[in-house]
Amino acid sequence: MTNWASPPDSVDALLKAVAAAKLVDLTHPLKAGMPVWPSHPLFCQEVVESLERGDVSCFHALSMGEHTGTHFDAPSHFIGTPGGWSISEAPLEKFFGRMATIHTKGMAPRAAVEPEVVMAWEAKNGPIAKDDAVFFHFEWDRFWDDHPREFLADWPGLSSATCELLAARGVRIVGSDCLSIDCFGSSDFPAHHILLGAGILIGENFARLGILPPICYLATLPLPIVNGSGSPLRAIAFVQSAQCV
């Protein structure tokens, strides 16, 4: 019988690492009025029972799209069968691991990150490794709460060549703090087709990427929606305290 009072060395090391890390919540809270893709349903939270009304408990009915708030796109969002697996079919290993954050301050509206930006980051911080999560900080999350109209327009994204480079690196997730990984105004969504076609999850609407160091650890937990093309999630970065920007 396993003695859980004395964890194995690997579990013990994990617990110590978590205890020593600074936790950074990369998730936008779900609330009424939050930005959503123009054709997607608004987030709605409706009181069903309330302690103030004299009910025995409090709970709410929720209504939202699969791509509400901080979320993942699964391959089935753009890719048909057999390669277009749903979010409930994603291997659990996709949700945990090393995270590389590339800060791209000063990008022009609607501009696309080219491979040179990624390679310059690698020259300074080391190569992006297989199964890394790679996130791009455009400073777009600054619009989320106070300027939602600005958030919903003109955001930058990734070029096709950059997506091909990341797919060749074998990364597991690519994301940003924008509404889409494709530049605003894209009609053919090349980044979505390339990344999702390679079985890479796409993360959108992430928060607080600007305080992360170049390398940290990411844990994410989307909902296992059967046949889901994506899911809202909770995303937490584990950072050595001295590394926070």
Image (cartoon, rainbow, N blue to C red):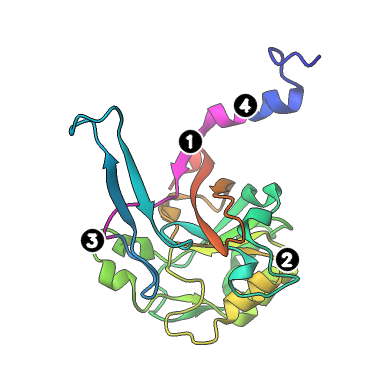
- 23 vs 189: above or below: above
Residue at point 34% right, 77% down? Answer: 153
Residue type (three-letter) at the residue carrying disc 4: Leu
For the question of whether residue 29 can be seen, the reply is no
Q: CA distance from mark 4 to mark 3?
A: 37 Å
- The residue indicated by pointer 3 is 146
Q: Residues within 10 Å of mark 1 (few under 14, many from 20)?
A: some
Q: Residues within 10 Å of mark 2 (few under 14, many from 20)?
A: some
Q: Secondary structure at mark 4?
A: helix
The earlier-in-sequence mark between 1 and 3 is 1
For the question of whether residue 196 can be seen, the reply is yes
Q: Quadrant of residue 33?
A: bottom left
Query: Which image quarter is the N terminus in?
Result: top right
Query: Is mark 2 in CB contact (under 8 Å) with mark 4?
Result: no
Callout in the foreground (3, 2) = 3
Q: Position of residue 14 (x, y in %)?
A: 66, 30
The earlier-in-sequence mark between 3 and 2 is 3
Residue type (three-letter) at the residue carrying disc 3: Asp
Residue at point 65% right, 70% down? Answer: 196
Q: Position of residue 171 (x, y in %)?
A: 69, 61
Q: Quadrant of residue 197?
A: bottom right
The earlier-in-sequence mark between 2 and 4 is 4
- The residue indicated by pointer 4 is 15
* Magenta residue span: 15-33
- The residue indicated by pointer 1 is 22
Give residue 178's mark.
none
Residue at point 56% right, 47% down? Answer: 220
Q: Residue furthest right?
A: 1
Residue type (three-letter) at the residue carrying disc 1: Lys
Q: Quadrant of residue 166?
A: bottom right
- The residue indicated by pointer 2 is 169
